[in-house]
Amino acid sequence: MKKLFAYTSLLALLAGVFWVTNVIWFKPFNINHFYDRVFFQFALERPEMLTQIHMLERFGITFHQSKLDDASQAASDEQLESLRKSLATLNSYDRSKLSYDQALSYDVFQWFMTNAEQNADRWRFHNYPVNQLFGVQNNFPSFMESAHQVTSKSEAEDYISRLSKLGIKFKQVMEGLKIREEKGIIPPTFVIDKVLSEMKAFVATAPQENILYKSLASKMTKAGKFSEQDQSKILGQAEQQIVQTIYPAYQGYIDYFSALRAKSNNDAGVWKMPDGDEFYAHALESQTSLKVQPETLHQLGLDEVARIQAEMRSILAKEGYDIRLPVGELMASLGEEARFQYPDTDEGRQQILLDYQKIIDEVSTGLGQYFSVQPTASVKVERIPAFKEKTAPGAYYNGPAMDGSRPGVFYANLYDIKATEKFGMRTLAYHEAVPGHHFQISIAQEAKGLPLFRRMAPFTSFSEGWALYAERVAWEAGFQTDPFDNLGRLQAELFRSVRLVVDTGMHAKRWTREQAIDYMLSNTGMVESDVVAEIERYIVMPGQACAYKVGMMKFQELRARAESALGTSFDIKAFHTLVLKNGAMPLVVLDRVVQDWIEMQKKDSAKGKV
């Protein structure tokens, strides 16, 4: 018996070694193992991502917690080579022999990797790594504040270690900045001015008032596991790193961009870059996951602006407003009415956060008619950190940790309180939280049976298109019966249609920043601070703003196609489950998935299986 047990154990060990060897060093027999291998290779090269998703810590794996991503050109070269090898391995599998689900993963993976290879190769330097929205200089404090957990002494020590490594990362990013300078890829003057203002304010802050210090202090206090002596020692180390490492690194960037400013100009569009028109075509396809022409999107935007404004005029007329005035002017005036504003006080801002949470809690319990699946992860509302809210967008969302240790967070910008008009709050909450981003991203993360990369794939047109589509679903579900709330919904859709016009206007038609601001102001009625932040966002994220409306219209198109084909057998809950539980994917692939589902439903209906 003992011999049999030993023999069985040896076979199991050899089988395990053979499996591990096959998965790690050779082409895996099972393509799902290949997907997981590539995902883990990708993640292992990005310790900040590992911290963000918080997937390994529950197993006691924390090697990444003290590290920052390698932003050097050498690392980028290695990542490009790895991408090419992974694509070659993928293409060596015979797609025709895969199951339906495996073939779907194959198509999603191939699209993603091909796009990533193009971004890492030809278009590597066609961006601005230091910018007012998501540059390394504001991403680092935000990441440390929102993602790096401190519940033990070792995690606090890792926090200090990461502070100590920022100087290295800044030097690595500087390599790429200088290459871009040689190529003539220099941010517009107004972008440089924004980042200089932000960084100067950052280094002018007393170390103990810096977000990196205050966040660490707050996390240790909240953990309740640190003695006063330990807290004092660790905070002393943080202050030392802020003074000796962090501030000098930022000062180096201040010096560099102060000198670079003389070489810049105020041209907004990427047309000014080398092969700028080709790059913009790539950016549009990368963001929308469809082959679309700038002129087509521009005209689509103009048509949608006209359609939505006509619908808004109808509502405004019923409410007694003079619709001879432009819609933008009417909405701007509406937003100034006292009944739609909060007091410009700390208490007013706190009430906004509470009201957002109330809206989310309400809608979360009233979607049974439209959804048979809901996420288990919770979502909370927080204010965008003060150090970056002046240049941040009106709102954004950070997904939950995969191990459930951190909820999803809907961040609201409360810098200009007039920008938070009560009639627009429901729509924004639906977009960022439920049934929008939090709903879609959490359901994908929690999906069973999908390769990891499909649970986390970042397809902008899918996720943003879904969130915009979700605004309409919430309205259909009866959560915006107040006509002014419905005006807020329409204004949000109008805003996304205007984006098509101004994004293509600046990057393809050579509009100036000022032209784009004027168009958005006159057509939406949004407050000027929000409009300026938005337009400057599109300048540093070409094509991304087009993904929202393009994605929404694809979801609407696919739903209408299914409704028409299936008639009374169409089930909206089944449709939503299909698109949510398969994870984000390129729209071109989503189209085929829904068409396949329609054909299957028709066959089942014919067999009496509805």
Image (cartoon, helix red, strand yellow):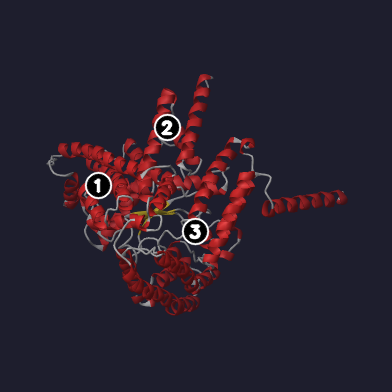
Q: Amino acid at mark 2?
A: Ile
Label 2 crowd bin: few (<14), some (14–19), many (20+), radius 10 Å? some
Q: Is residue 397 left or right of residue 486?
A: right
> Which of pointers 1 and 3 indicates the residue nearer the eye?
3
Between residues 255 and 576, which one lies in front from this camera angle? Answer: 255
| Residue that appears at 36% across and 58% down | 540
Q: Which residue is mark 3?
A: 52
Q: Position of residue 354 (x, y in %)?
A: 32, 54
Query: At which x and y percent is residue 434?
Result: 39, 45
Q: Is residue 45 visible?
A: no
Dot 2: element: helix
Residue carrying label 2:
572
Q: Is residue 470 left or right of residue 165?
A: left
**Residue 448 placement (x, y as % from top left):** 56, 43
Location of mark 1 (residue): 423
Q: Where does residue 179 sit, x and y in percent of width and height?
A: 45, 67
* Identity, as a three-letter code, of the amino acid under mark 1: Phe
